Amino acid sequence: MIAAQLVPTPVGPLSLLSREGVLVAAGFTADPTEMFVRLTPALQSEGLEVVDDLGPAASATRAYLAGDLDALDEIPVSQPGSPTRKRLHQALREVKAGTTVSYAELAERAGLPRTAARAAGSACAQNLIAPFVPCHRVLPSGGGYGGYYYGVPVKEWLIAHESGQLSNVE
């Protein structure tokens, strides 16, 4: 069974989906089924149940929102993908809160050439576990914020939160 919990955040509800203590999806939506339908058919076949408390993932989210910017790093995650995509997702998890990288830099961090920036962008677009796999920390080298599955305002808020640009009264 896939267990889901909604955690309130300043930029809207964050749906967390977990299987046996491992986060398989997370995203800024009030409807966990929006994340559930993005899972593999094998995971979907297990069904979805909304619960009151997912435990460590929910606690880490609350700690992150309270200012412990490394709290999400310890939560185990699992998502499908090719070996290259998995390397890119692992490289994303190694980008520290409060910093950003370009798509070309992310490719390099995953052991790919800088010219694999499009592959890095694709890995970000297909990421099922935001902000635990922090694709919001990747910015276009030409400037600006680029896109974000949950909207640029959410990406801007996450980056501002992590860089200390928000007041404690978020």
Image (cartoon, rainbow, N blue to C red):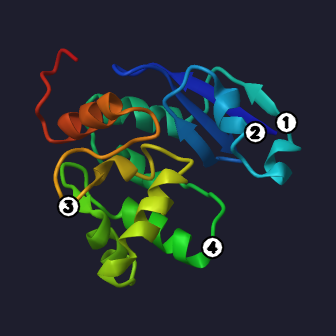
- Above or below — where is 59 with respect to 123? above
Q: Viewed as shown, does residue 67 lie left or right of 10?
A: left
Mark linked to residue 47? 1
Front residue of 63 and 8: 8
- How would you rate the neighbour count of disc 4 (Cα within 10 Å): few for under 14, some for 14-19, many for 20 or more? few
Task: Name the residue located 72 percent from the left edge and 34 percent from the top edge.
Answer: 3
Give the residue pinned by disc 3: 141
- Above or below — where is 69 with respect to 49? below
- How would you rate the neighbour count of disc 1 (Cα within 10 Å): few for under 14, some for 14-19, many for 20 or more? few
Secondary structure, mark 2, is strand
Where residue 125 appears, x then y in whole percent?
Answer: 49, 52
Q: Label 4, label 1: how many angstroms apart (C-alpha)?
A: 25 Å
Q: Label 3, label 1: how many angstroms apart (C-alpha)?
A: 41 Å
Q: Label 4, label 3: how many angstroms apart (C-alpha)?
A: 25 Å
Give the residue pinned by disc 2: 2
Q: Viewed as shown, does residue 118 lie left or right of 128?
A: left
Secondary structure, mark 4, is loop
Front residue of 52 and 152: 152
Front residue of 44 and 69: 44
- How would you rate the neighbour count of disc 2 (Cα within 10 Å): few for under 14, some for 14-19, many for 20 or more? many
